[in-house]
Image (cartoon, coloured by chain):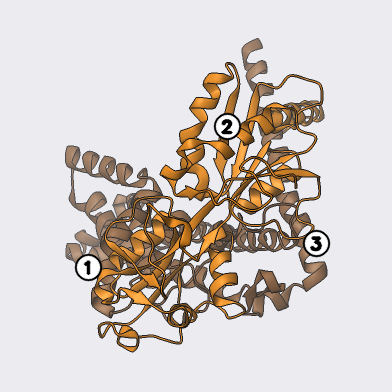
Amino acid sequence: MKIDKVMDRVTHTVFALFLVVWLSVAGIIVWGTWRFISHYGFLSPILSSRWNPLAGQFGLWPFILGSLTVTVLAVVIAFPGSLALSVLGSRILQGIWRRYFVRLLMVFVSVPSVLYGWWGLIVIVPWVRRLSGTSGYGMLSASVVLGLMILPTFSILSLEAIRQVPESYVEGSVGLGATEDQTLWRIILPAARPRLVQAALIAVARGLGETIAVQMVIGGQIGGPGLLHPAATLTTQLLTDLPFLPPGVPGHDVLDFMAFDLMVLMTIIVWLQMRIGSWRYE
Amino acid sequence: MISRRQFVIGLMTAPLFWWIALLDTAPSRKGRTRRRLSVMGATSLMGYVKAALPGWEQQHAGVRVAVSPGGSYAGLKGLSTGQVDLALSDIDPPPGFVVVPVHRFPLGRIAILIIVNCEAGVKSLSWHQVRALFEGTITNWRDVGGKELPVVVVSRSLSSGARQVIQDGLLKRAELSSHAIIQLSNGAVAKTVRETPGAVGYVEAVMPLSGVLVVDLGAHHYHPANPVSWPLYAEPSIYVRRDAEPLAPNLAEYLARGSERFRFGIYSVAREGEGEGGRRG
């Protein structure tokens, strides 16, 4: 009983500590953001395309567009494969095969992102170069690398989503004479849809926040039109310009503002996830 | 539900947590013997500093030196705020950037080389041609006597000292091509140029270069054994606060005089009125 009380206090204390640390991190970002927007405004940096920190131009639109494009494209690339793998793991493989299949996916989830970036550099960039005749660095390469990186996470979450569908739905469908394919497309996937969308949103959040793997293959430039030219995202530009704009330097606040924009995007995703989590299959 | 008391305990624990975390980076107090030094700055100098440090640490038993890259700007700002003891920089600090009095210990020069992919088919370029290539006004190698191949410009980020030399010494006020690939290190630039047909870039000569072609610049030919006449170079220095305790300038002087510098592409040029040791900043 005494141990329970101690553990209770420890866990609550840790939670309070976490809250304080999180608030202090968020506070630093919000304070920097406030300083930035009080000088440059809120909307005009977001909508502007001119990025030249030396000249005091802080247009973030190319990075926001880069982040959204790379992430959405990565999810589009990863979605069919993830769905196939999740159906394989939840409906086709049985017993030990299923267990090892899930373990294998877990191994791929735990591969550090720098290895995906490295693999992108030696496989995807030359491949895109050969196909397009460009340098190979750009949003397409970044999306493919990111798509393959989020695929295992997306697959495991989708697999769990499909496994959550009550077996009685499947038995009812088969009992009424539906084939396995019909049951999959008309019963299982629609029933799992809210959780599948949640899985996609988690994959989007992972994609938006990814930095190093994307940085290695995207080219790091700001004005490239199209998917085949060098581009940059919010996170890669943060990484690139942090050494140039360390804390205490005029212009550092724009990095806080970029981090704030990322936080807002993530918050929207979490909110959507919570909303979708309350959906029910009718 | 979290109680008020538990929340207060958490609040009280947080500063302790931060104090422990920041203990390592706290500036030294005058008069107190310090057994730990921190060095931060230009990534191009990291190879040399890491190679030279064991020799100095042997002479100063018990003193540990932590080295971290981060770029010249971060190093100089860290020195200003007292977070690091030595800043490595291959740029001149912009006016007002370092707000404390510092000593400057010049290391010498590092040549900045123009490298091209082997398929480009050129061995020599004029200043004007190199400028036009980096600006993006020449977009095919055939225009400079090379093969029929599109030009791909590879550059470093704004925080790089090499980028600043190229910007000031070569491009002047012109802007770099908007299609340039930006890489974060010398190694990444060299790798990209090596593997991308038609690529052109620039690197600091701090590492062996293979699989790329170092082009002649006008009448200048780069030779590693005699880099003095090469016209594009950075002048890296070590900066130490004037109020630093003796260990910091001692280390800076050791690094500034190190015989291993040449192995890492750093060479000395004797100047009138300036010795090899620390010049007072």
Q: Which residue is mark 2?
A: B66
Q: Position of residue A86 (x, y in %)?
A: 28, 54
Q: Are marks 3 and 2 in contact (CB under 8 Å)?
A: no
Residue A194 visible: no
Q: Do badges 3 and 2 share one subunit?
A: no
Residue under label 1: A182
Rendered image quadrant of residue A35 = bottom right
- Numbered disc 2: what chain? B
**Image height of B41 relative to A66, above or below:** above
Q: Colour of chain A?
A: brown
- Pointer 1 and pointer 3 on the same chain: yes
| Residue B114 left/right relative to A169 | right
What SS does tag 3 mark?
Answer: helix
> CA separation, marks 1 and 3?
57 Å
**In front of the other: label 2 or label 1?**
2
Amino acid bearing label 1: Gln
Q: Is residue A180 visible?
A: yes
Judging by colour alone, the chain drawn in orange in this rendered image is B
Where residue B109 appears, as percent x and y from the top left, is 53, 53
The alpha-carbon separation of the residues under discs 3 and 2 comes to 33 Å
Identity, as a three-letter code, of the amino acid under mark 3 = Arg
Q: Is residue B238 above or below residue A116?
A: above
Q: Nearer the viewer, residue B197 or A125?
A: B197
Q: Quick one: SS at disc 2?
A: strand
Circle 1 packing at 10 Å, graded few (<14), some (14-19), many (20+), is: few
> N-terminal of the two: label 1 or label 3?
3
Write down the residue under mark 3. A35
